[in-house]
Amino acid sequence: MKIRVLYFAAVRDVVGADEEALELPAGVLTVGAFAAFIVGKRPALEGRMAYVRIAKNEAFADEDEPLADGDVLALIPPVAGG
């Protein structure tokens, strides 16, 4: 299954990219499984994912939400502003 991943704010800085296309392994079928997979692919995210929200197709997603070919996942860290 192919997906597109968007990286925002501090996650973008850590990863060093705005976005990428990924081919997910057969066992990565949910948002939660993707979260574990992306830490293996991008080790700099280890320890940070507990604070990162994942949106699927522009809506925040729960860990058990299924993934489909062509989905767009966004990794959004907490942000502060003033």
Image (cartoon, rainbow, N blue to C red):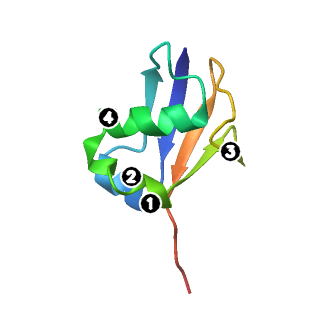
Identify the element where label 3 is drawn. loop
Question: Along the polypeptide, which appears first: circle 4 or circle 3?
Answer: 4
Classify the position of the N terminus by image quarter. Answer: top right
Identify the element where label 1 is drawn. helix
Identify the element where label 4 is drawn. helix
Of circles 2 and 3, the one toward us is 3
Spatial separation of the CA atoms under disc 2 and disc 3: 19 Å
Residue carrying label 1: 9
Q: In this view, does 31 lie above or below 60?
A: above
Residue carrying label 4: 40
Residue carrying label 3: 61
Question: Along the polypeptide, which appears first: circle 1 or circle 4?
Answer: 1
Spatial separation of the CA atoms under disc 1 and disc 2: 5 Å
Residue carrying label 2: 12
What amino acid is labelled 3 in the image?
A: Ala
Callout 3 environment at 10 Å: few (<14), some (14 to 19), or many (20+)? some
Callout 2 environment at 10 Å: few (<14), some (14 to 19), or many (20+)? some
Question: Along the polypeptide, which appears first: circle 4 or circle 2?
Answer: 2
Spatial separation of the CA atoms under disc 4 and disc 3: 20 Å
66 left or right of 21 in image: right
Q: Which residue is drawn at 35% across and 40% down?
A: 39
Residue 40 placement: quadrant: top left
Of circles 4 and 2, the one toward us is 4
Spatial separation of the CA atoms under disc 1 and disc 3: 19 Å
